[in-house]
């Protein structure tokens, strides 16, 4: 059956539930699954699983809010669009600006992590090449993006299953299972749970990519809620299981200090010969997450440009596959500049703060919804909003202050542009 003609300037609806779920799960099981457990374990100690659960609860509240809003507003841009429609232009702008800036930095981190796994001595040029190639895939159309995401996701899931088997088989060093509780409580204790949950939230934030693709999803009122909740459920089970297995298998100090905890889990097991497989899986995870990130940031950039919150040229859609090619190329250029000029391996907290602000706006917008599309109680939106604010405030100060400064710069810039437009009568 032929698709109906697409209006000029609009994207085509090509994605079903499976494709949408794969894009969300591929984002959540990106490079974060291979690195985020260590800094979270250093903060939460033996309560790492509790931190995962807290992050999962907040993520569930946010996912329900996003699903409700996406069903009401099935267009590209995610919470940027929802905030504008339900709360006003300024909350929408804050959400969109936080997402675009935070996730652009995340793109650079994912690309550089890929470079370090593939060729540590040439990490930056490999990272730049990955950004160029994956941007080219995105320009070929959303169906190609979804296909490659599903292939990479299959590799990542196989790698995680192998790591879980290695952790179960052991051998388990002294101090891993029995000594973790005592040593962890001394080092971190319960006060570290919330900061650790804030970092773990970085890993759960991938379902936002499904909402940002709302204009390219078939039957969005049904598909988007199903895909968001399915992707989140899958990621939560995997992250919670890995947290328990890693703490059972590795000594607490080793887990907290590791730069590659899943790699160490295999290296310290009877399956250590499979270390190259884990390295390949980590590389695939980085590529999958980077592909989905570039896609989501490009669509949000396009949505902001349509409303003149960013230069209107970024809203141009064209080519055989009707993609936002100017936004995609601009995002790729910004990521490459970051790769060539900065060290972006420490942006997990920075990105988490921006995304938590983004979802705080989503919960506030969902709270104002009325009518048949509201399929969850408002107290869930209140819980989600409070959880986002609490986790954002407990992140490491450098991360919170850095992202707050970027948000403030964006707000000041928009205020100046609006004043100039009013003066010129534009």
Image (cartoon, grey):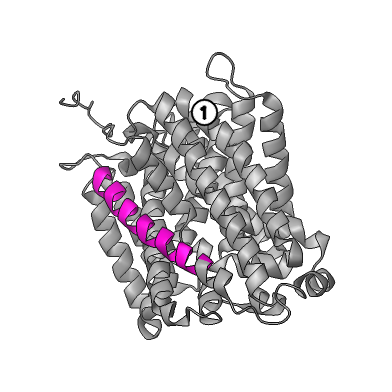
Residue 400 seen in the current view: yes
**On screen, 291 above or below 209?**
below
Quadrant including the N terminus: top left
Residue 154 x/y as whole percent:
36, 56
- 287 and 334: which one is in front? 287
Q: Viewed as shown, does residue 179 lie left or right of 405?
A: right
Which residue carries the number 1 mark?
69
Question: Tag 1's secondary structure?
Answer: helix
Residue 339 seen in the current view: no
Q: Residues within 10 Å of mark 1 (few under 14, many from 20)?
A: many
**On screen, 192 above or below 384?**
below
- 12 and 95: which one is in front? 12
Specify the segment rendered in magenta.
Answer: 142-164
Q: Quadrant of residue 3?
A: top left
Residue 401 x/y as whole percent:
67, 59
Residue 273 x/y as whole percent:
43, 82
- 300 inside magenta stretch: no
> What is the chief secondary structure element of the magenta stretch?
helix
Q: Quadrant of residue 10?
A: top left
Quadrant including the C terminus: top left
State how many labels appear. 1
Residue 177 x/y as whole percent:
71, 72
Q: Viewed as shown, does residue 211 lie left or right of 168?
A: left
């Amino acid at each position: 059956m032929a698709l109906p003609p697409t209006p000029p300037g609009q994207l085509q609806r090509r994605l079903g539930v499976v494709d949408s779920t794969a894009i969300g799960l591929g984002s959540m099981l990106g490079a974060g699954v291979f690195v985020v457990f260590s800094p979270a374990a250093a903060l939460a100690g033996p309560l790492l699983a509790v931190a995962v659960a807290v992050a999962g609860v907040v993520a569930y509240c946010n996912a329900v809010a996003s699903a409700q809003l996406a069903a009401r507003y099935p267009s590209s841009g995610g919470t940027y669009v929802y905030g504008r429609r339900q709360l006003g232009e300024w909350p929408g702008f804050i959400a969109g600006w936080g997402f675009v800036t935070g996730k652009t930095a995340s793109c650079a981190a994912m690309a550089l992590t890929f470079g370090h796994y593939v060729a540590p001595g040439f990490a930056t040029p490999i990272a730049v090449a990955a950004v160029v190639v994956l941007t080219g895939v995105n320009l070929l159309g959303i169906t190609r993006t979804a296909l490659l995401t599903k292939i990479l996701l299959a590799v990542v899931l196989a790698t995680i299953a192998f790591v879980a088997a290695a952790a179960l088989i052991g051998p388990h060093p002294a101090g891993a299972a029995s000594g973790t509780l005592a040593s962890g409580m001394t080092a971190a204790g319960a006060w570290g749970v919330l900061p650790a949950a804030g970092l773990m939230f970085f890993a759960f934030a991938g379902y936002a990519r499904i909402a940002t693709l709302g204009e390219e999803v078939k039957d969005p009122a049904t598909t988007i809620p199903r895909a968001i909740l399915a992707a989140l459920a899958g990621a939560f089970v995997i992250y919670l299981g890995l947290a328990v297995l890693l703490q059972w298998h590795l000594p607490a100090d080793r887990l907290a200090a590791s730069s590659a905890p899943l790699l160490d889990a295999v290296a310290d097991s009877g399956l250590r010969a499979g270390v190259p497989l884990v390295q390949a899986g980590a590389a695939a995870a980085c590529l999958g997450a980077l592909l989905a990130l570039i896609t989501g940031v490009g669509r949000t950039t396009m949505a902001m440009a349509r409303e003149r919150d960013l230069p209107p040229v970024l809203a141009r859609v064209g080519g055989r596959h009707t993609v936002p090619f100017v936004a995609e190329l601009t995002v790729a250029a910004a990521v490459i500049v970051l790769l060539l000029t900065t060290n972006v391996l420490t942006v997990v907290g920075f990105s988490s703060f921006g995304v938590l602000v983004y979802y705080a706006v989503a919960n506030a917008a969902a709270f104002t919804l009325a009518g048949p599309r509201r399929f969850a109680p408002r107290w869930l939106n209140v819980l989600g909003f409070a959880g986002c604010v609490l986790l954002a405030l407990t992140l490491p100060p450098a991360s919170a202050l850095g992202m707050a400064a970027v948000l403030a710069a964006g707000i000041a810039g928009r205020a100046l542009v609006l004043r100039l437009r009013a003066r010129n009568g534009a």
